[in-house]
Image (cartoon, rainbow, N blue to C red):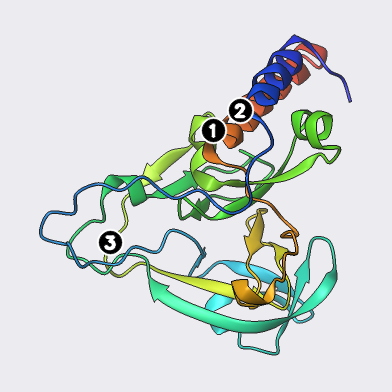
Amino acid sequence: MCQHKGMTMFAERVTAKGRPAEGTVGTPGRDCGTHEKAVIVATGLLSDTQVATPMGWRAVEGLVAGDMVLTFDNGFREVTAVESAKIWTGDGLAPQDHWLVEMPANTLGNRTTLRLPPQQGVMVESDAAELLYGDPFSVIPALALEALPGVSRLPVRAKTRCVTLRFAEEEVVFSREGGLLHCPSSRDLLDLDGDRPQYEMLPLTLARDIVETLTLQEARASELCPVI
């Protein structure tokens, strides 16, 4: 893959910051006012999201433990648990920090609009990740995609629900909209026994740097392949 000035500058910045620590990054919170006891779920797949199964596309809320789902790295894998919850249990709208990330069609190869909680992991492909980590694919929080053209935030109401699919090990699944979405393991953290996670979520600062290079790649492609 081609490496240009933008990639070199990115590599210098990330080298200074270091390799990301394990785990996910938390969403900065705001005062919820009268909703001090409200619960916010920042990861998961929205109800009505469809994933690939041996029976075709199926909505996540219709899946149960034992169903098989197509994964990015490991073919069909068995779902070990399905958890459903309201994203926001307070009254009215959730705090703005927790609004959904809405990506219009063709933002990252997605065929239709994709909506995700801000800390839901999304797999992206970039030259920068390959340059730094030897793998072009990395998992970043959806919040980092805000910098892409057309991406916006969508208010979360109390009725909005999301579903968490769990597998024996971490997996990345295909959504019908065209997203590659991270799903957690059903194993307790104490059972990991020092194992590194299969997919490390990049911290938000590094994830934003990766997204910046995605816009550079797109601009570079436009230069090489001008629209006539």
- The residue beneath circle 2 is 209
Judging depth in this view, the residue of 38 and 162 nearest the camera is 38
Q: CA distance from mark 2 to mark 3?
A: 30 Å
Is residue 15 visible in the rendered image? The answer is yes
Q: Position of residue 94 (x, y in %)?
A: 26, 56
Query: What percent of the width, then of the height, locates residue 32?
Result: 18, 54
Q: Amino acid at mark 3?
A: Arg
For marks 2 and 3, the one nearer the N-term is 3
Along the viewing direction, whichever of 216 and 120 lies nearer the viewer: 120
Residue 199, by quadrant, is bottom right
> Where's the N terminus, which quadrant?
top right
Q: Mark 3 = which residue?
A: 157
* Residue pictured at 76% horizontal, 11% vertical: 223
Please, what secondary structure does the residue beneath circle 1 have? helix
Q: Position of residue 179 (x, y in %)?
A: 65, 53
- Labels 1 & 2 near each other (Cβ < 8 A): yes
**Looking at the image, is mark 1 or mark 3 nearer the viewer?**
1
